[in-house]
Image (cartoon, helix red, strand yellow):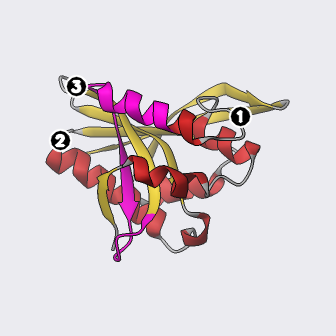
Amino acid sequence: MVRLRPFKKLDIDQMLSWMEDERQTAVWASGVFSWPLNREEILARVVQAEQAEDEWVMACLDEQGNIIGQLYMRMADYEENRVHLNMIIMDPAKRGQGLGTEMVKKTVEYAFFVLGMQKVTLGVFDCNPGAYACYLKAGFHDTFVEEHAYEYQGEIWNRQHMAIERDS
Protein backbone atom coordinates (compact mmCIF):
# COMPACT_ATOMS: atom_id res chain seq x y z
CA MET A 1 0.00 0.00 0.00
CA VAL A 2 1.18 3.51 -0.79
CA ARG A 3 0.04 6.81 0.62
CA LEU A 4 0.09 10.34 -0.77
CA ARG A 5 0.74 13.59 1.03
CA PRO A 6 2.02 17.01 0.07
CA PHE A 7 5.76 17.09 -0.61
CA LYS A 8 7.66 18.82 2.19
CA LYS A 9 10.94 20.68 2.13
CA LEU A 10 12.37 18.00 4.41
CA ASP A 11 11.83 15.48 1.55
CA ILE A 12 14.27 17.23 -0.79
CA ASP A 13 17.45 15.53 0.40
CA GLN A 14 15.89 12.09 0.08
CA MET A 15 14.65 12.86 -3.42
CA LEU A 16 18.05 14.23 -4.46
CA SER A 17 19.63 10.89 -3.50
CA TRP A 18 17.53 9.17 -6.20
CA MET A 19 19.10 11.14 -9.06
CA GLU A 20 21.86 8.91 -10.36
CA ASP A 21 23.18 10.92 -13.30
CA GLU A 22 22.65 13.76 -15.74
CA ARG A 23 20.71 11.65 -18.26
CA GLN A 24 18.23 10.44 -15.64
CA THR A 25 17.74 14.06 -14.54
CA ALA A 26 17.03 15.06 -18.15
CA VAL A 27 14.51 12.21 -18.56
CA TRP A 28 12.82 13.25 -15.31
CA ALA A 29 12.84 17.03 -15.67
CA SER A 30 13.44 17.70 -19.40
CA GLY A 31 15.51 20.78 -18.79
CA VAL A 32 13.66 22.23 -15.81
CA PHE A 33 16.66 21.47 -13.58
CA SER A 34 20.37 21.44 -14.32
CA TRP A 35 22.92 18.79 -13.38
CA PRO A 36 24.13 18.26 -10.78
CA LEU A 37 20.90 18.84 -8.93
CA ASN A 38 21.10 20.92 -5.81
CA ARG A 39 18.84 21.54 -2.86
CA GLU A 40 18.37 25.27 -3.54
CA GLU A 41 17.15 24.70 -7.11
CA ILE A 42 14.66 22.04 -6.00
CA LEU A 43 13.51 24.19 -3.08
CA ALA A 44 12.91 27.17 -5.39
CA ARG A 45 10.75 24.99 -7.68
CA VAL A 46 8.78 23.59 -4.72
CA VAL A 47 8.15 27.13 -3.44
CA GLN A 48 7.07 28.17 -6.93
CA ALA A 49 4.58 25.29 -7.01
CA GLU A 50 3.29 26.21 -3.55
CA GLN A 51 2.58 29.75 -4.76
CA ALA A 52 0.81 28.64 -7.95
CA GLU A 53 -2.92 28.08 -7.91
CA ASP A 54 -2.80 25.28 -10.46
CA GLU A 55 0.06 23.06 -9.28
CA TRP A 56 1.53 21.29 -6.29
CA VAL A 57 4.06 18.62 -5.45
CA MET A 58 3.04 15.30 -3.92
CA ALA A 59 5.10 12.72 -2.06
CA CYS A 60 4.45 9.00 -2.13
CA LEU A 61 5.01 7.10 1.09
CA ASP A 62 5.33 3.42 1.87
CA GLU A 63 3.33 1.74 4.65
CA GLN A 64 5.85 2.89 7.24
CA GLY A 65 5.62 6.53 6.12
CA ASN A 66 8.97 6.64 4.31
CA ILE A 67 9.08 8.72 1.13
CA ILE A 68 9.53 6.48 -1.91
CA GLY A 69 8.35 8.72 -4.74
CA GLN A 70 7.46 12.22 -5.80
CA LEU A 71 5.48 13.91 -8.56
CA TYR A 72 4.04 17.22 -9.65
CA MET A 73 0.37 17.77 -10.32
CA ARG A 74 0.14 20.86 -12.50
CA MET A 75 -1.91 22.76 -15.03
CA ALA A 76 -5.05 22.06 -13.02
CA ASP A 77 -7.97 23.30 -15.08
CA TYR A 78 -11.13 23.51 -13.01
CA GLU A 79 -13.32 24.45 -15.97
CA GLU A 80 -12.17 21.54 -18.12
CA ASN A 81 -11.77 19.32 -15.02
CA ARG A 82 -8.31 18.03 -15.87
CA VAL A 83 -4.84 17.98 -14.36
CA HIS A 84 -1.41 16.99 -15.69
CA LEU A 85 1.13 14.76 -13.90
CA ASN A 86 4.74 15.69 -14.34
CA MET A 87 8.25 14.87 -13.10
CA ILE A 88 7.34 11.52 -11.58
CA ILE A 89 10.20 9.73 -9.83
CA MET A 90 10.60 6.68 -7.59
CA ASP A 91 13.36 5.65 -5.24
CA PRO A 92 15.51 3.36 -7.47
CA ALA A 93 15.57 0.76 -4.67
CA LYS A 94 11.75 0.54 -4.86
CA ARG A 95 11.42 0.17 -8.63
CA GLY A 96 10.17 -3.07 -10.13
CA GLN A 97 7.84 -3.84 -7.21
CA GLY A 98 4.65 -2.32 -8.62
CA LEU A 99 4.88 0.67 -6.29
CA GLY A 100 5.20 3.15 -9.16
CA THR A 101 1.98 1.88 -10.69
CA GLU A 102 0.33 2.03 -7.28
CA MET A 103 1.59 5.61 -6.78
CA VAL A 104 0.20 6.71 -10.15
CA LYS A 105 -3.14 4.98 -9.50
CA LYS A 106 -3.38 6.63 -6.08
CA THR A 107 -2.64 10.01 -7.65
CA VAL A 108 -5.34 9.47 -10.28
CA GLU A 109 -7.81 8.55 -7.51
CA TYR A 110 -6.86 11.77 -5.71
CA ALA A 111 -7.41 13.77 -8.89
CA PHE A 112 -10.78 12.16 -9.55
CA PHE A 113 -12.26 11.87 -6.08
CA VAL A 114 -10.65 14.70 -4.11
CA LEU A 115 -10.18 17.31 -6.83
CA GLY A 116 -13.21 16.27 -8.88
CA MET A 117 -11.24 16.04 -12.12
CA GLN A 118 -12.54 14.08 -15.08
CA LYS A 119 -9.22 13.64 -16.88
CA VAL A 120 -5.56 13.19 -15.92
CA THR A 121 -2.79 13.55 -18.49
CA LEU A 122 0.96 12.98 -18.59
CA GLY A 123 3.83 12.70 -21.04
CA VAL A 124 6.68 10.20 -21.15
CA PHE A 125 9.78 10.13 -23.33
CA ASP A 126 10.25 7.16 -25.64
CA CYS A 127 13.65 6.53 -24.02
CA ASN A 128 11.84 5.62 -20.77
CA PRO A 129 10.04 2.32 -21.53
CA GLY A 130 9.76 1.32 -17.85
CA ALA A 131 7.77 4.45 -17.02
CA TYR A 132 5.63 3.99 -20.13
CA ALA A 133 4.76 0.42 -19.05
CA CYS A 134 3.95 1.69 -15.55
CA TYR A 135 1.49 4.25 -16.91
CA LEU A 136 -0.20 1.66 -19.12
CA LYS A 137 -0.60 -0.62 -16.08
CA ALA A 138 -2.11 2.31 -14.17
CA GLY A 139 -4.80 2.62 -16.86
CA PHE A 140 -3.48 5.42 -19.08
CA HIS A 141 -3.88 5.23 -22.84
CA ASP A 142 -1.92 6.88 -25.65
CA THR A 143 -3.31 10.12 -27.04
CA PHE A 144 -0.60 11.42 -29.38
CA VAL A 145 3.16 11.48 -29.98
CA GLU A 146 5.06 14.74 -29.84
CA GLU A 147 7.92 14.22 -32.29
CA HIS A 148 11.35 15.70 -31.42
CA ALA A 149 10.09 16.91 -28.04
CA TYR A 150 13.50 17.11 -26.41
CA GLU A 151 17.15 16.87 -27.37
CA TYR A 152 19.74 15.48 -24.98
CA GLN A 153 23.41 15.31 -26.00
CA GLY A 154 22.58 14.64 -29.64
CA GLU A 155 19.71 12.23 -28.91
CA ILE A 156 16.22 13.23 -30.05
CA TRP A 157 13.45 12.07 -27.74
CA ASN A 158 9.79 11.85 -28.69
CA ARG A 159 7.18 12.35 -25.99
CA GLN A 160 4.19 10.01 -25.80
CA HIS A 161 1.22 11.89 -24.37
CA MET A 162 -1.21 9.77 -22.36
CA ALA A 163 -4.50 10.26 -20.55
CA ILE A 164 -6.98 8.53 -18.31
CA GLU A 165 -10.61 9.58 -17.95
CA ARG A 166 -12.92 9.08 -15.03
CA ASP A 167 -15.82 6.70 -15.60
CA SER A 168 -19.09 8.58 -15.33
Residue 74 against residue 100 in the figure, above or below: above
Residue at image x 45%, y 68%? 99
Foreground residue among 36 and 100 = 36
At which x and y percent is residue 12? Answer: 49, 49
What residue is shown at x 41% (from left), y 46% (from top)? 9
- Kindly report the distance in space between the C-alpha atoms of the residues bearing marks 2 and 3: 12 Å
Where 45 falls versus 134 (above or below)? above
Q: What number of labels is visible? A: 3
121 w.r.t. 112: above or below: above
| Mark toward the viewer: 2 or 3 | 2
Q: What crowding class fits label 3: few (fewer than 14 Cα within 10 Å), some (14-19), or many (20 or more)? A: few
- Please say whether residue 167 is visible from this viewpoint: no
Name the foreground residue: 107 vs 62: 62
**Does residue 111 belong to the magenta stretch?**
no
CA distance separating discs 1 and 2? 32 Å
Give the mark toward the camera: 1 or 2.
Answer: 2
Assign the N terminus to one quadrant of the image.
Answer: bottom left
Residue type at mark 3 is Glu
**Callout 1 amino acid:** Trp
Report whether residue 96 is seen: yes
In the picture, the disc for residue 45 is none
Residue 46 included in the magenta stretch of the image: yes
Q: Which residue is mark 1?
A: 157
Residue receiving disc 3: 80
Amino acid bearing label 2 = Leu
Measured from the top left, where is residue 95 in percent x and y? Answer: 57, 68
Percent of width and height locating residue 5 = 29, 55
Which span of residues is magenta-colored? 43-67
Residue 115 — which label? 2
Residue at mark 3 to residue at mark 1: CA–CA distance:
29 Å
Q: Earlier in the sequence, mark 3 or mark 1?
A: 3
Label 1 secondary element: strand
